[in-house]
Image: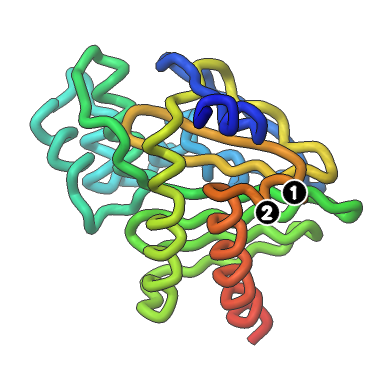
């Protein structure tokens, strides 16, 4: 019954597998498109230090060759590190055949298309938030303690969904069509996602609380961004 319900709203089960780097351009500004694509962490090269820059400690760990598996495992399990960095560390471990603990939620991304463009809200395990308005305006929240309870609440209602589905084994899809909402989850064992009509997803027992809590977080982000 649960499997049928998940399938009805696009939260299908999928086998684990490697996800190729994918780039989409839903915004008119290519710099914003780059930020949008980096939210999903399916192209690690975008996180490398630029030519002439000194790599940060986490960049050195992620891209060292040969890999330092002990350092990668420590980075992946570091709750103070950015969720995307931890996801990349888990991905690097999996790519090299290491077994990782599954179902550790590190990021939640909600995409809602409108006639004016795509609204994208992303929240990560350390409390960071990114919001790209349909106009292409970007709001970045980092280190704001007032947002942490809202992010934790969003994660708490997302975890039941993550516990019931599995990683998407194919390249990331293009942004959702108008009328739909897509929920993407960065998880230690891969990228998970579910998609369906907004009207159906809002009333669904598991997806509904995610959408409602994301709306609450979005209101706070917009209020901050307008100051």
Q: Report the front residue among 182 and 196.
A: 196
Farthest residue in the left direction? Answer: 70
Q: Which residue is drawn at 22% across and 40% down?
A: 76
Dot 1, how many residues are within 10 Å of its Cα: few (below 14), some (14-19), or many (20+)? some
Farthest residue in the bottom direction? Answer: 227
Q: Report the front residue among 53 and 213.
A: 213
Q: Mark 1 points at which residue?
A: 198
Q: Report the front residue among 2 and 26.
A: 2
Return the x and y of residue 121 as percentages of the image width and height. 60, 56
- Pointers 1 and 2 in contact (C-beta within 8 Å): yes
Farthest residue in the right direction? Answer: 115
Q: Residue at x 43, y 74 (%)?
A: 147
Position above or below: 160 against 96: below
Question: Can see residue 31?
Answer: no
Dot 2, how many residues are within 10 Å of its Cα: few (below 14), some (14-19), or many (20+)? some
Q: Quadrant of the C terminus?
A: bottom right
Q: Residue at x 58, y 20 (%)?
A: 171
Q: Name the residue under label 2.
A: 202
Return the x and y of residue 151 as percentages of the image width and height. 43, 64
Instruction: Name the side, left or right, on which 74 lies relative to 193.
Output: left
Give the image quarter of residue 149.
bottom left
Position above or below: 165 against 203: above
Instruction: Name the side, left or right, on which 39 lies relative to 95.
Output: right
Position above or below: 64 against 96: below
Local secondary structure at mark 1: helix
Return the x and y of residue 163 as percentages of the image width and height. 37, 37
Q: Residue at x 80, y 60 (%)?
A: 135
Local secondary structure at mark 2: helix
Q: Report the front residue among 114 and 3.
A: 3
Farthest residue in the front direction? Answer: 1
Instruction: Name the side, left or right, on which 124 lies relative to 8.
Output: left
Return the x and y of residue 161 as percentages of the image width and height. 46, 41
């Amino acid at each position: 019954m649960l499997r049928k319900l998940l399938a009805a709203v696009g939260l299908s089960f999928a086998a684990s597998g490697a996800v190729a780097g994918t780039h989409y351009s839903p915004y008119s500004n290519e710099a914003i498109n780059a930020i949008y694509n980096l939210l999903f962490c399916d192209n690690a090269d975008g996180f490398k230090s630029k030519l002439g820059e000194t790599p940060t400690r986490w960049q050195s760990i992620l891209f060292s060759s040969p890999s330092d598996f002990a350092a990668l495992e420590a980075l992946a399990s570091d709750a103070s590190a950015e969720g995307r960095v931890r996801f990349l560390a888990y991905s690097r471990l999996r790519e090299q055949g290491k077994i990782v603990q599954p179902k550790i939620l590190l990021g939640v991304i909600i995409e809602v298309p409108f006639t004016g463009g795509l609204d994208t809200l992303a929240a990560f395990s350390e409390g960071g938030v990114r919001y790209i308005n349909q106009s292409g305006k970007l709001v970045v929240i980092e280190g704001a303690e007032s947002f942490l309870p809202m992010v934790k609440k969003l994660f708490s209602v997302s975890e039941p969904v993550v516990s019931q589905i599995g990683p998407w084994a194919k390249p990331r899809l293009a942004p959702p069509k108008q009328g739909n909402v897509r929920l993407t989850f960065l998880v230690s064992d891969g990228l998970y996602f579910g998609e369906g009509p907004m009207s159906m997803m809002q009333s669904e027992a598991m997806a509904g609380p995610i959408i409602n809590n994301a709306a609450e977080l979005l209101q706070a982000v917009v209020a901050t961004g307008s100051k």
